[in-house]
Image (cartoon, rainbow, N blue to C red):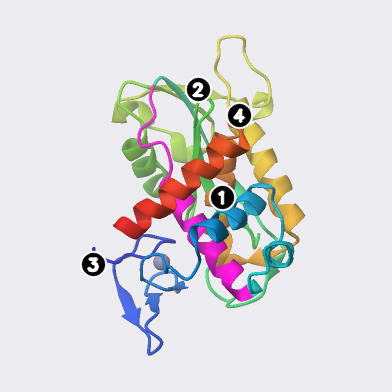
Amino acid sequence: MARIICPRCHCEKLYRMSTGKRRCSHCRYDFHPHRLPLYLTRDQWKSIITWFLLEQSSQTIANKTGIERKRVLRALTWIRRALIRDVPAVFSGTVEVDETYVGGRWKNKRTSIREKGTKRGRGTKKQPVFGILCRNGLVWAEIVDNVEAATLQPLITSKVKKGSIVCSDSWRAYTGIASKGFVHRMINHGERVYSDGKGNHINGLEGFWGYLKRKLAAKGGIRREKLFLYLGEYVWRYNHRKESEKVKLKRILELLEKEVGG
Ligand SMILES: [Zn+2]
């Protein structure tokens, strides 16, 4: 089996639990390391994915398909884990970078971890999220421990091709990215929602944050350690929003099969 890493924070140091699950030493996420269990038929997967694409709840999917809710929940986790991996590899051209905070109504389980505030959003119990959006409309976003330069700049360097134009607001973590080989266009905070007419704006990412927050709010509170799965889901839905349900179904089936095949 390939090296196992935490699907949430990519940490490699894992504890093996008596159940066979692994627990991440860094973020404490518990997960099953095995590949896709073939406990559902291809037709069952198809109907679960179809209802998932229509954003139905696990209970509704269980009722519609006649599959036990527990198995539906496991299947949905497999789907979300597959979607996380289906992201654009490298961005180029003109890109927008920005960070935001999501959550606030966590279902409490291990709420004690990572409540450390940052200067921005200080005292907040919300989770910082960092995102990159390319002007072709594709977005990438991941939860981050904090919104400082040491965290955000390596993400920009690894996800954005050198020479690209990077638009950001004036948050201090973005200071100095010009020296990393990018053309940096900074938008003043007060005017960040307006375009200056030269294409220097982060309106695309603002739009995605709005979409993400509406979707998460509609969920009515999720477990904090599961946020990365929902974030991955909504990044994927956003990136594929112009495709038909049929195309999306086919794509997700292929992703899951890839997972089974290794
Ligand atoms: Zn982890």
Residue in the picture at 61% in, 55% down = 47
- The kind of residue tagged 2 is Asn
Residue closest to the eye, 98 or 221: 221
Nearer-N-terminus badge (4/3): 3
Which residue matches tag 2? 136
Which residue matches tag 1? 233
What quarter of the picture does the N terminus occupy?
bottom left
From where the camera sits, is residue 115 visible? no
Classified by dominant secondary structure, the portion drawn in magenta counts as helix
Q: Contact (CB < 8 A) between labels 4 and 1?
A: no
Which residue matches tag 4? 242
Which residue matches tag 3? 1
- Secondary structure of the residue carrying tag 4 is loop
Residue in the picture at 41% in, 65% down = 36
Residue in the picture at 55% in, 44% down = 249
> For this view, does 29 lie left or right of residue 10?
right
